[in-house]
Image: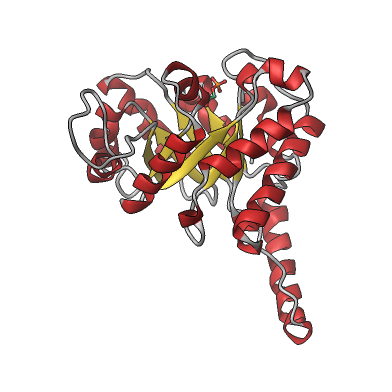
Amino acid sequence: MRPLAGRKRVTETAAWLNRLAVCKKVRVMKSPTPLIAGNWKMNGLASSIAEAKAVAEGVGATQVRVAICPPCILIDRMSDALAGSKVLVGGQDAHADDAGAFTGDISAEMLADAGAKLVILGHSERREAYREDDELVAKKVRAALRHGLEPIVCVGESLDQRNAGKALEVVTAQVRGSLPPELKGKAFAVAYEPIWAIGTGLTPNNPQIEEVHGAIRATLVEMFGEEAQVVPILYGGSVKPSNAAEILHAREVGGALVGGASLKAADFLAIVRAV
Ligand code: PGA
């Protein structure tokens, strides 16, 4: 991704090309608006809302879309604390049903009711620990759409799968299986998170990221048509201030899903500013 000033020029050029293209009946697609989302996982207490407020103050009127996904118990208070700021609040998971006898679960409707605007779905920690498969993730995506939440759908291969040369096959199969056709025309993001890069400090190199993101983009276009060119494809897995600029400037990287480094406002802000 290019720096904002550069991207503004690109947008202007795209608008100009679009005007030109009217005669030729060719459309030049816009690039996705970058999204930087923080995934707090099972971290944070009421006192941590101060970090989210510091993020909101630090981002000011940024053109980057910024979101924080805290534990669901904090969504209500965080949404109030961030009202009027550029920072959106999101959930980390949602049940596929709207209500019922599901002890301990949270529905998409409840998240939306508490002030969430987005929801992470199909994170590898949930796919692994709670045996969530693509079919269930697709049901959860439908639930999110029913309640106006923008899903961030996670995909990613294990180290064994990468070493066996199966990364592209695994990831594109997850994209096909986890994204229902109802997403057509709706706002959503895909997060490519190689499992071996999450919380390990390891990251793929840019050619590896570009290869997977390119395959995800091609799959999205196949599934949803040219409009899928504007779906942000986030990279996630050990993104931190020191590697953010390099990763975020890779081709087809439309933002980041940030775990550990999203817990401290200063680190998260440094990543937002690296776009
Ligand atoms: P990490 O987590 O940034 O701590 O590696 C990313 C994620 O799991 O979303």
Residue drawn at x 67%, y 23% is 242
Looking at the rendering, which quadrant does residue 52 occupy?
Answer: top left
Quadrant for the N terminus, please: top right
Residue drawn at x 51%, y 24% is 259
- Which one is nearer the viewer's eye here, 104 or 48? 104
**Ligand 1 positioned in quadrant:** top right
The image shows residue 260 at horizontal and vertical percentages of: 51, 19
Residue 71 located left or right of residue 236: left
- Image vertical order of residue 160 relative to residue 20, above or below: above
Q: Is residue 240 visible?
A: no
Residue 52 located left or right of residue 6: left
Residue drawn at x 74%, y 27% is 166
The image shows residue 38 at horizontal and vertical percentages of: 47, 31
Residue 35 located left or right of residue 208: left
Q: What residue occupies the far right of the structure in this picture? A: 207
- Image vertical order of residue 263 relative to residue 119, above or below: above
Quadrant for the C terminus, please: top right
The image shows residue 137 at horizontal and vertical percentages of: 45, 36
- Which one is nearer the viewer's eye here, 87 or 89? 89
Looking at the rendering, which quadrant does residue 74 occupy?
Answer: top left
Residue 223 located left or right of residue 91: right
Looking at the rendering, which quadrant does residue 267 occupy?
Answer: top right
Q: What residue occupies the far front of the structure in this picture? A: 135
> Number of labelled discs?
0
The image shows residue 55 at horizontal and vertical percentages of: 43, 34
Q: What residue occupies the far bottom of the structure in this picture? A: 23
